[in-house]
Amino acid sequence: AVDVRTRTEAIAIDRHAKTVRLRNLHTGEETDEGYDKLLLSPGAEAIHPNLPGMGSPRVFTLRNIPDLDRIMAHLAATQPRRAVVVGGGYIGIEMAENLLERGLFTTLVEGAAHILAPFDDDMAAIVHAHMKDKHLELYLSDRIERLEDKADHTVVFLASGKRLPADIVVVAVGVRPETTLARAAGLELGPTGGIRVNAHLQTSDPDIFAVGDAVE
């Protein structure tokens, strides 16, 4: 049998007692669950750049369904006309495409010389041309420096000096491994910041394994 606990958060690991502290998100009650072997699969979290203005209610990151729900609620409530997407990876490009199809004037900002880092220059150039054909505004080799809220919009300041007015800003500049539980439990991390595992996905604790985006 499989015991599934929805609306339950794992908040701590006691490696010596071999228990996991769980919090019931409905009641707030905390309990300890014992384990013989433990598998960590917490995934990754969106990178939130430490920039002035990131706390604006018009600024969103996109990693999961709750993030998307917040973006959709903002679109419905404010009917924005201008969007700025920061990050030219797969998520940023999909976001820009969908905002454009919703009728927003959309700008994509990418710090590298071309979007889609795994692509070579010639392949990325084809995508650049397609974007311009679709009237998507594209800024390459440029980075966001800060954001400033105005009464009815937010201004995105780029390193080049360009100022972009936006009714919604989506920051999609990548993810980092979610290692909060692992770090608190004293599990070793690798040089990339993910949980260090061996060829069998075993962490520095032989009874704890880790998989997915959380591992290095």
Image (cartoon, rainbow, N blue to C red):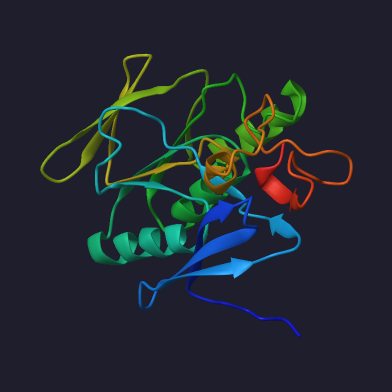
x then y, percent, for residue 84: 38, 39
User: Image check: 58 left or right of 125?
Assistant: left
The quarter of the rendered structure image containing the N terminus is: bottom right
**Residue furthest to the left:** 151
In the picture provided, is 181 more to the left or to the right than 68? right
Query: Looking at the picture, does residue 45 appear above or below residue 37?
Result: above
Please name whichever residue, 138 or 88, is drawn nearer the observer in this view of the structure. 88
Residue 192 sits in which quadrant? Answer: top right
Residue 190 visible within the image: yes
The residue positioned 36% from the left and 72% from the top of the image is 28
- Residue at position x 70%, y 33% from top? 126
Counting from the top left corner in percent of width and height, residue 79 is at 27, 60
Q: Is residue 156 above or below residue 23?
A: above
Q: Residue furthest right?
A: 199
Image x and y of residue 212, in percent? 72, 50
Q: Is residue 134 visible?
A: no
Is 151 on the left or on the right of 97, as rendered?
Answer: left
